[in-house]
Image (tube, rainbow, N blue to C red):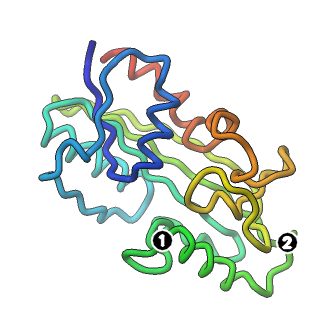
Amino acid sequence: MGTLVIATKNKGKYLELKKMLGDISFTLLSLEAFPHIEIRETGASFDENALIKARVTAKETGLPALADDSGLEVDALKGEPGIFTARYAGEHATDEDNIKKLLERLKNVPFDKRQARFMCSLALAFPDGKIFLEHGILEGFITLKPCGIEGFGYDPVFFVPDLGRTLSEISVDEKNRISHRAKALEKMKKHLYML
């Protein structure tokens, strides 16, 4: 049985990926197990940041590493927050801070003009330098106010038309079937079976 490092210190993201990887039998670790590893996301795109995280983690741990860089792109804001999704309202912003800033920036935009998408770039790096990159997208709209209690990040304001609800109004299991991360991970699984 192999070991895979999920290259994140974000507990919500780690638990989500761990749950989605439940049917693959290997040991999962997060970057919490390697406190000495510091990764600077200096890329100009989700792809670049995912690749940086995966490569650094694989090199530093000597283990295969899976790294996700994902974020929210809002059409009315010309793609913001984009690669700054997690720190939209500042370096140490909470989910609530980020949502507040997003809703403030969209305050005069009607609901039908609030198209948005969650993008996910998922990179798998091996210590020998081998790399795989997969993508997932979930389309939706930004609501006028937060709704629901599940999930994390921007889930309370991300409305999925096919469901008629926000990501915070559905179960974690349901989200894990349709999310941008789930779509990218489904494509990545064929590479994970090589572990």
x then y, percent, for residue 5: 28, 35
Q: Is residue 127 left or right of residue 27?
A: left
Q: Is 166 located above or below residue 58 in the figure? A: below
Name the residue carrying label 1.
94
The quarter holding residue 55 reads top left
Q: Is residue 87 left or right of residue 161?
A: left
> Element at badge 2?
helix
Name the residue carrying label 2.
111
| Residue name at image x 53 percent, y 59 percent | 71
x then y, percent, for residue 192: 39, 22
Q: Nearer the viewer, residue 86 or 123?
A: 86
x then y, percent, for residue 95: 53, 68
> Element at badge 1?
loop
| Residue name at image x 38 percent, y 15 percent | 25
Q: Is residue 125 left or right of residue 56?
A: right
The quarter holding residue 181 reads top right
The kind of residue tagged 1 is Thr
Query: Mark 2 and mark 1: span between their CA atoms?
Result: 24 Å
Question: Counting other residues with Cα less than 10 Å from the Cα at mark 1, is it few (<14), some (14-19), or many (20 or more)?
Answer: some
